[in-house]
Image: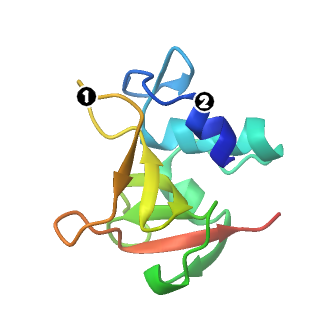
Amino acid sequence: MINVAEQELGVPYVWGGKSPAGFDCSGLVYYAFEHGAGINVGSYTVAQEGAGTRVSLSQLQPGDIVFWGAAGATYHDAIYIGNNQYIAAPQTGDVVKIQTISSYFQPSFGVHVNM
């Protein structure tokens, strides 16, 4: 999943996008898992919360999905790649990129996807 997501670095953010023509946050997660592992994790953040086992931020492993917002009402997600970094399609006017977890915009929890 990480390799697939890395291949999409620089692709523009597109609301509802789920392809290399453009991605939103959950579309990138969906695409990376579908094309990198053959796993359908769902196409929006709340569905993706149920794709595996919930873990705390201290338990994150590369390939886990990180979520922002309360469980059942998440509004953003990304793919954790290790070393306190993740790949995300952040917002309108931006592109898929690697970002660092910070106290300013810290994820709420992670999900380890059942393979």
Q: Which mark is residue 92?
A: 1
Q: Quadrant of the C terminus?
A: bottom right
Q: Amino acid at mark 2?
A: Gln
- Residue 106 percent location from the top left of the image: 28, 69
**On screen, 80 above or below 24?**
below
**Crowd tier of the residue under label 1, counting other residues whose Cα lies within 10 Å: few below 14, some 14–19, many 20 or above:** few
Q: Residue at the location (59% across, 39% down)?
A: 5
Q: Quadrant of residue 92?
A: top left
Q: Nearer the viewer, mark 2 or mark 1?
A: 2
Marks 2 & 1, CB-CB < 8 Å contact: no
Q: Which mark is residue 7?
A: 2
Q: Amino acid at mark 1?
A: Thr
How far apart are the alpha carbons under marks 2 and 1?
A: 20 Å
- Residue 7 percent location from the top left of the image: 60, 30
Q: Quadrant of residue 62?
A: bottom right
- Residue 47 percent location from the top left of the image: 57, 55
Is residue 75 at least partly visible in the picture? no
| Left or right: 39, with 27 as reference point | right
**On screen, 108 above or below 86?**
below
Q: Residue at the location (42% across, 33% down)?
A: 96
Q: Residue at the location (32% across, 40% down)?
A: 90
- Residue 6 percent location from the top left of the image: 57, 37
Is residue 102 at least partly visible in the picture? yes
SS type, badge 2: helix
Toward the left, the furthest residue is 104
Image color mode: rainbow
| Number of marks in the rendered image | 2
SS type, badge 1: loop
Q: Which mark is residue 12?
A: none
Which is nearer the N-term, disc 2 or disc 1?
2
**Crowd tier of the residue under label 2, counting other residues whose Cα lies within 10 Å: few below 14, some 14–19, many 20 or above:** few
